[in-house]
Image (cartoon, rainbow, N blue to C red):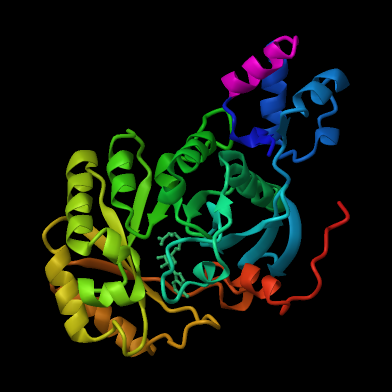
Amino acid sequence: MKIALQGLFPEELQALCQAAGQPAFRGKQLWQWLQIQGATDWAQMGNLPRALKEKLAETHTPAPAKILKESGEPGGTRKWLVGLADGESVETVLIPARERNTVCVSTQVGCKMGCAFCASAKCGFARGLSAGEIVAQVQLVAVALGKRPDNVVYMGMGEPFDNYDETLRSVRILNHPDGLNIGARRITLSTSGVVPGIRRLAGEGLQVELSVSLHAPNPDLRRKLMPIENKYPMDELLRECADYTAKTKRHVTFEYTLVKGVNDSLRDAEELAGRLRRFPCRVNLIPLSPVDEFAGEAPPRPVLEAFLRALETRGVEGTLRESKGKGVDAACGQLRRRAQSGALPQKEDRPD
Ligand code: SAH
């Protein structure tokens, strides 16, 4: 596969242009097209010599952000099924809230993690995305919005730390002062608990937010929901998170998806608080978003609130995230899954 240009830094684009016998400033023009204009096609790059484009196109390409399917409403949560150069597809979501626009990006086509209630796991794993393919998702939303998004969360399809290098490269490009310039604190990496990834991130010197999906108050229950518990057990994971906090002085947010009758009791909340009280952190409670392949449902509102209060009275800070994406199949992997199973209307390329 050709290298996606949105994954290259300005100096790399300059070197590329120089190697093609062109002055370095062409690299700067290329960067502008990709990172400021959100170009996804050579044809858009009017001020670049055709010979240069032809030469570069032998090995490189702008990541196409080909929209296969769009759902949601302007002003509300919107979701895109984005086609990639090799015919694969991933999902990208825009969540507008309180005048801030958050983009949720995918890092892999499918996922290997196999979490019980996650639709991404159910359609198999194809490959990790390149940094350029990750950046192109944010650019696609920037073009749709007509302005730069405020926040980026790595909570779409895939496990970011199972694709660590490309993920981190995409973070640095999104954060680049000459590009979208999205502040590191406005970028959230979410992991199912890949311990070596957390350790590496602690050494990156980046101020990004780290979310860790926990979903259970103890290893036995976690194992039932998340197979990764067998590889990176909860105790080891929490130790690593405590080390991360000590080293970076940044708090970890634990994601906890609440499933009725499974992990939502007051005893669960007490046990969770007991484990998390040992170091400063937060818990983000998420009511289960229904998916076809998992029989569970979200607990009723009073149960969610009681769970939150039980954490807080035990000294663990928590938030209750409203589910915003219901109307657009916003749970990870749902849109792609429906497209695969034929439940969506025929895929349509937009004419533009
Ligand atoms: N692989 C990463 C990031 C992608 S998922 C991770 O596991 O963190 C982002 C979050 O959405 C995770 O916490 C995930 O467990 C959660 N999630 C997945 N499916 C869900 C569903 N049906 N309802 C609620 N949350 C879900």
Asked whether residue 315 appears in the rendered view, the answer is: no
**Residue 163, horizontal then vertical, whole percent:** 47, 46
* Residue 347 located within the stretch drawn in magenta: no
Residue found 21% across the figure and 71% down from its top: 219
Q: Is residue 182 rendered to the left or right of residue 248?
A: right
Residue found 55% across the figure and 83% down from its top: 292
Q: Is residue 281 rendered to the left or right of residue 47?
A: left
Query: Residues in magenta?
Result: 10-23
**Residue 159, horizontal then vertical, whole percent:** 45, 55
326 over 75 or under it: above or below: below
Relative depth, front residue between 114 and 62:
114
Q: Is residue 317 rendered to the left or right of residue 178?
A: left
Residue found 86% across the figure and 34% down from its top: 43
Specify the quadrant of the image occupied by residue 296.
bottom left
Specify the quadrant of the image occupied by residue 252.
bottom left
Relative depth, front residue between 221 and 64:
221
Residue found 18% across the figure and 46% down from its top: 243
4 over 222 or under it: above or below: above
**Residue 171, horizontal then vertical, whole percent:** 48, 40
**Residue 77, horizontal then vertical, whole percent:** 61, 67
Asked whether residue 343 appears in the rendered view, the answer is: yes
